[in-house]
Image (spheres, rainbow, N blue to C red):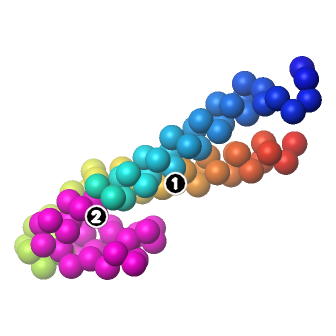
Amino acid sequence: MQMGYPDTVEILTMIWFVVSALVAVIGTVVFWLWRFRRGAKLSFTWSGTPGYLEYACIKWCRNQGRRPNRGIIAFRAISIVNAIIAAAFVIAISKR
């Protein structure tokens, strides 16, 4: 193997990180727009903070007398955790 070229594991890890980050970001935007269009009062400034949109969604649903959609909240949590784990792997691989 030549020096400077990433091997297959490094390439796959980088792809995993990019895809997981895109899923987390796009999921945040879609979730924010969906909640905003339904009338929830959301702060755009805090929307990138993990947990804020979920908390605002649960609070809004309770005020409306509705049950929050746990599947969407679970997907959001899993996608954020996946992005964090992928970032940890990229950092670990880049240090070797």
Query: What residue is at 78 percent from the left and 26 percent from the top?
Result: 7
* Residue annotated with mark 1: 81
Was residue 54 drawn as part of the magenta stretch in this picture? yes
Pick whichever, 56 or 45, lies toward us.
45
Residue 78 visible within the image: no
The reply to whether discs 2 and 1 touch (Cβ–Cβ < 8 Å) is no
Pick whichever, 35 or 66, lies toward us.
35
Q: Secondary structure at mark 1?
A: helix
* Residue annotated with mark 2: 32
Query: What residue is at 87 percent from the left and 42 percent from the top?
Result: 96
Query: What residue is at 36 percent from the left and 52 percent from the top?
Result: 27
The quadrant where residue 35 appears: bottom left
Q: Which residues are magenta?
A: 31-59
| Image side of residue 7 versus residue 25, left or right | right
* Disc with the residue nearer the chain's start (2 vs 1): 2
* Structural crowding at the residue carrying mark 1, measured as other residues with C-alpha within 10 Å and reported as few (<14), some (14–19) or many (≥20): some
Query: What residue is at 12 percent from the left and 66 percent from the top?
Result: 38
The quadrant where residue 68 appears: bottom left
> How far across and how far down the image is residue 12, in percent?
64, 31
Q: Amino acid at mark 1?
A: Val
| Image side of residue 54 versus residue 15, left or right | left
Q: Secondary structure at mark 2?
A: helix
